[in-house]
Image: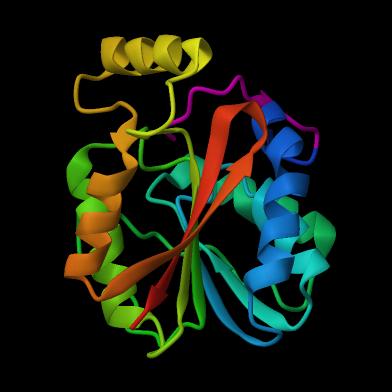
């Protein structure tokens, strides 16, 4: 399970992510404003599963399917979901953006990807955009991504600069991506960047729509 967060196991078997607890509320506010009232949602790189429970619980009209390539992450997701017992939260899928084998065909009204793009090789972002381009309903299907980015018109916060160095020291294929490069990759898959939302701790959310 790829993360820069300190994870602790809970008595129920799930992993507790302090970062997930901090950012779930602000992310949920954006999702509430832009998600459809009903439909299927695929979450990519869902990590501990705390986001899945928080979002599915707050958006009961959505049929929520989390995923992660890590068996450890999926076990944590299952533990959190088992405790929450939400009727609209499905078992986690084993999806890897570097391996198209087993990718779902959709259609999905929305896809959500939190804190993956900078903690993965660039090929994972390419895969994310290909999957979204294939699987989102057209027109209007939503891809929401969250995390820190480099932006030409915005000074890089010192904390993000330090974070970028830390990421690259752990894996040279990781690191903060340029927002415009991510948007250009999305465009190749038929996705248009429609909104940028500033978030706490120098993060942003980017909302793409299938066209």
Residue 124 locus on image (x, y percent): 25, 48
Could you say which quadrant of the image residue 31 lies in? bottom right
Q: Is residue 72 visible?
A: yes
Q: Magenta includes 103?
A: no
Query: Residue at horizontal 31%, vertical 26%?
Result: 175
Q: Is residue 97 visible?
A: no
**Magenta region: which residues?**
1-11
Q: Is residue 52 above or below residue 202?
A: below
Quarter holding the C terminus is bottom left
- The main secondary structure of the magenta stretch is loop
Query: Residue at horizontal 39%, vertical 81%?
Result: 136
Q: Magenta includes 8?
A: yes
Front position in the image: 101 or 44: 44
Front position in the image: 41 or 188: 188
Query: Residue at horizontal 47%, vertical 29%?
Result: 3
Residue 197 locus on image (x, y percent): 58, 50
Residue 117 locus on image (x, y percent): 36, 42
Q: In the drawing, does residue 82 fall left or right of residue 208?
A: right
Q: In the drawing, does residue 86 fall left or right of residue 132?
A: right
Q: Please, which residue is most extreme toward the front here?
A: 153
Residue 87 locus on image (x, y percent): 77, 78
């Amino acid at each position: 399970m790829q993360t820069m967060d300190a994870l602790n196991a809970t008595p129920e078997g799930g992993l507790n992510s302090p970062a997930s607890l901090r950012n779930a509320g602000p992310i949920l506010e954006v999702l509430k404003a832009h998600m459809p009232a009903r439909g299927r949602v695929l979450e990519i790189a869902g990590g501990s599963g705390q986001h899945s429970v928080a979002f599915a619980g707050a958006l009961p009209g959505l049929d929520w399917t989390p995923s992660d390539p890590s068996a450890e992450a999926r076990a944590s997701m299952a533990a959190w979901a088992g405790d929450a017992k939400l009727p609209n939260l499905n078992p986690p899928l084993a999806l890897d953006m570097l391996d198209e084998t087993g990718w779902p065909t959709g259609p999905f009204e929305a896809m959500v990807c939190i804190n993956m793009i900078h903690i993965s090789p660039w090929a994972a972002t390419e895969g994310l955009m290909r999957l979204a381009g294939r699987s989102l309903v057209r027109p209007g299907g939503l891809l929401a991504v969250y995390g820190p980015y480099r932006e030409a018109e915005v000074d890089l916060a010192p904390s993000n600069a330090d974070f970028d160095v830390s990421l690259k020291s752990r894996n040279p294929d990781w690191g903060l991506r340029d927002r415009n490069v991510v948007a250009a990759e999305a465009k190749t898959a038929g996705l248009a960047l429609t909104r940028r939302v500033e978030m706490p701790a120098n993060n942003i959310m980017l909302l793409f729509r299938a066209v």
